[in-house]
Amino acid sequence: MSDQWWFCLKHMRVEPEKGCPNKDRLGPYESEEVAAQAMQRAAERNKAWAEQDREWEED
């Protein structure tokens, strides 16, 4: 079993190390469970960046 897992943006699913090209994936992640949360984590990070950008624009 692979030590690295990826989230495929093309198929919207978790993949082992051998899968779609890396240009279509997020990762690598240390476990299948963490890879499954990739989209949620990305959304949270995007929201945090957007809030930080608003704070900078207010200065």
Image (spheres, helix red, strand yellow):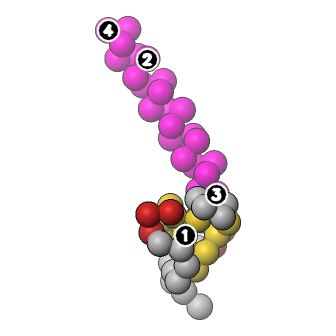
Left or right placement of residue 57 versus residue 17 in this view: left
The quarter in which the N terminus is drawn is bottom right
- Main SS of the magenta segment? helix
Q: Position of residue 55 (x, y in %)?
A: 40, 16
* Mark sitting on residue 54: 2
Q: Secondary structure at mark 4?
A: loop
Q: CA distance from mark 2 to mark 3?
A: 26 Å
Mark toward the start of the polypeptide (2 vs 1): 1
Q: Which three-letter amino acid code belongs to the residue tagged 1?
A: Trp
Residue 46 vs 21, above or below: the answer is above
Whether label 2 touches label 3, CB < 8 Å: no
Give the foreground label among 2 and 1: 1
Q: Nearer the viewer, mark 1 or mark 3?
A: 1
In this picture, which residue range is highlighted in magenta?
A: 35-59
Question: Which three-letter amino acid code belongs to the residue tagged 2?
Answer: Arg
- Residue 59 is marked as 4
Write down the residue under mark 3: 37
- CA distance for labels 1 and 3: 10 Å
